[in-house]
Image (spheres, grey):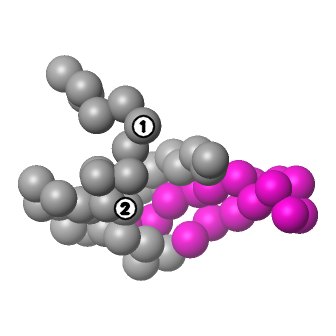
């Protein structure tokens, strides 16, 4: 129930995840925040068909 957007190109990309800096929406503070060194695991994507 969150969204993430790449802030820059990922530092690491594998078949299971990518790692880097992302922007996400913090619903508790109701604003965008930046998370560095975040591991984004593809298994949590709602829409896995990225082609």
In this rendered view, identify the residue nearer to me: 8 or 50: 50
Image point (25%, 28%), residue name: 50
Left or right of residue 51, residue 20 in this image: right
Residue 46 numbered tag: 1
- The picture places residue 44, in percent across and down from the top left corner, at 38, 52
Left or right of residue 47, residue 50 in this image: left
What is the span of residues highlighted in magenta in the rendered image? 20-35
Q: Secondary structure at mark 2?
A: strand
- The picture places residue 32, in percent across and down from the top left corner, at 74, 55
Of all residues, the one furthest to the bottom in this rendering is 37
Image point (24%, 60%), residue name: 17
Please state which of the two labelled residues, at mark 1 or mark 2, is closer to the viewer: 1
Image point (36%, 70%), residue name: 39
**CA neighbours of label 1 inside 10 A, class few (<14), some (14 to 19), many (20+):** few
Q: Give above or below for 23 relative to 48.
A: below
Indicate which disc, 1 or 2, sits on the residue closer to the N terminus.
2
- The picture places residue 30, in percent across and down from the top left corner, at 88, 54
Image point (62%, 55%), residue name: 24
- The picture places residue 3, in percent across and down from the top left corner, at 58, 45
Quarter occupied by the C terminus: top left
Residue 12 numbered tag: none
Q: Quadrant of residue 11?
A: bottom left
Q: Secondary structure at mark 1?
A: loop
Instruction: Determine the CA span between mark 1 and mark 2.
Output: 13 Å
For residue 47: magenta? no
For label 2, the residue is 40
Report if residue 14 is visible in the image: yes
Of all residues, the one furthest to the right in this rendering is 29
Of all residues, the one furthest to the top in this rendering is 51
């Amino acid at each position: 129930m969150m969204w993430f957007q790449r802030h820059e190109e990922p530092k690491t990309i594998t078949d299971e995840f990518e790692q880097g800096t992302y922007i996400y929406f913090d619903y508790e503070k109701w604003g965008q925040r930046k998370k560095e060194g975040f591991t984004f695991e593809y298994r949590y994507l709602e829409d896995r068909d990225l082609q």
